[in-house]
Image (cartoon, helix red, strand yellow):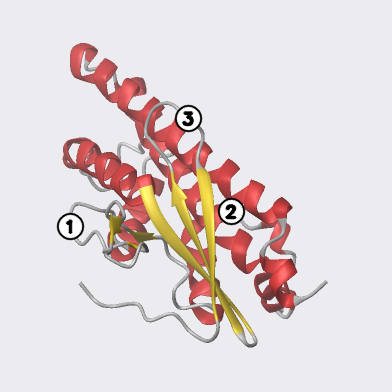
């Protein structure tokens, strides 16, 4: 299988879309649990929201492996401890590996395409209101502190502060996913998947583009 054929694999595309859809469904569920918590003040409802957000972030991390699977698998096979990538689950650790094999692995949020006079379409970057990679990693670690019952002799986990932040985290995650690009590199070719993933309604879909050489990703 050629490099391009490997990158265009329908299996990997399906996995990417499946995990993005999972992330969206979990984000929706977390909103429902937060609404329940707002009216009931029941701690289990808040903890259910926290769990669903963390799993949504993990789904995004798993999606990010798909277009980089071959390199990711090879890189992980060289690890001295636990070289089996199929047992990976921690989003932060997955990100650290992906950064080493593709610095542009994180979803790049886009604005809707604008038509140009020559008949082509251009996507500008969406630069505000989205879940950045830095905030993703920070909130993921904070969520992990609330996956177990609180030890009454330990430090305050600032649960209420987290509860106040969750709505914005969920909104930013939706904004990140609803229209984004993910970049895939192989010798002599670069591929971009433009992914539309609506919060409600139809399942996510992918538009594939190819370039000879690297894409230029402009800063916001």
Relative side of 31 to 103, left or right: left
State the CA–CA distance, disc 1 to disc 2.
28 Å
Q: Which residue is labeled 1 in the image?
A: 128
State the CA–CA distance, disc 3 to disc 1.
25 Å
Return the x and y of residue 162 as percentages of the image width and height: 22, 42
Q: Which residue is at the front of the view, 75 or 181?
A: 181
State the CA–CA distance, disc 2 to disc 3.
27 Å
- Mark 1 neighbour class, 10 Å CA radius: few under 14, some 14 to 19, many 20 or more: few
Q: Which residue is labeled 2 in the image?
A: 89
Give me the residue at 73% from left, 51% from top.
Answer: 11
Q: How many marks?
A: 3
- Mark 2 neighbour class, 10 Å CA radius: few under 14, some 14 to 19, many 20 or more: some
Given this view, does label 2 or label 3 mark the residue nearer the observer? 3
Return the x and y of residue 85 as percentages of the image width and height: 70, 63
Position of residue 22 relative to residue 11, above or below, is above
The C terminus lies in which quarter of the figure?
bottom left
For this orientation, the residue located farthest to the right is 1
Position of residue 155 relative to residue 120, above or below, is above
Give me the residue at 67% from left, 62% from top.
Answer: 8
Given this view, does label 1 or label 2 mark the residue nearer the observer? 1
Relative side of 72 to 54, left or right: right
Q: Which residue is labeled 3 in the image?
A: 202
Give me the residue at 71% from left, 53% from top.
Answer: 10
């Amino acid at each position: 299988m050629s490099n391009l054929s490997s990158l265009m694999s329908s299996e990997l595309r399906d996995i990417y879309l499946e995990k993005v859809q999972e992330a969206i469904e979990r984000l929706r569920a977390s909103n429902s649990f937060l609404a329940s918590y707002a009216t009931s003040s029941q701690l289990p409802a808040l903890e259910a929201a926290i769990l669903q957000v963390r799993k949504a972030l993990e789904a995004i991390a798993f999606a990010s492996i798909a277009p980089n699977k071959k390199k990711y698998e090879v890189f992980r096979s060289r690890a001295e401890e636990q070289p089996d990538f199929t047992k990976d689950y921690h989003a932060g650790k997955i990100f650290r590996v992906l950064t080493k094999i593709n610095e542009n692995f994180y979803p790049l949020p886009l604005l809707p395409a604008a038509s140009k006079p020559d008949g082509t379409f251009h996507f500008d970057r969406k630069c505000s209101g989205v879940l950045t990679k830095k905030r993703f990693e920070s909130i993921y670690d904070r969520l992990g502190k609330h996956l177990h019952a609180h030890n009454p002799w330990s430090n305050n986990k600032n649960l209420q502060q987290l509860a106040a932040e969750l709505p914005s985290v969920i909104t930013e995650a939706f904004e990140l996913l609803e229209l984004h690009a993910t970049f895939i590199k192989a010798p002599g070719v670069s591929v971009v998947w433009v992914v539309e993933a609506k919060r409600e309604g139809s399942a996510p879909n992918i538009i594939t583009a190819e370039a000879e050489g690297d894409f230029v990703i402009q800063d916001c």
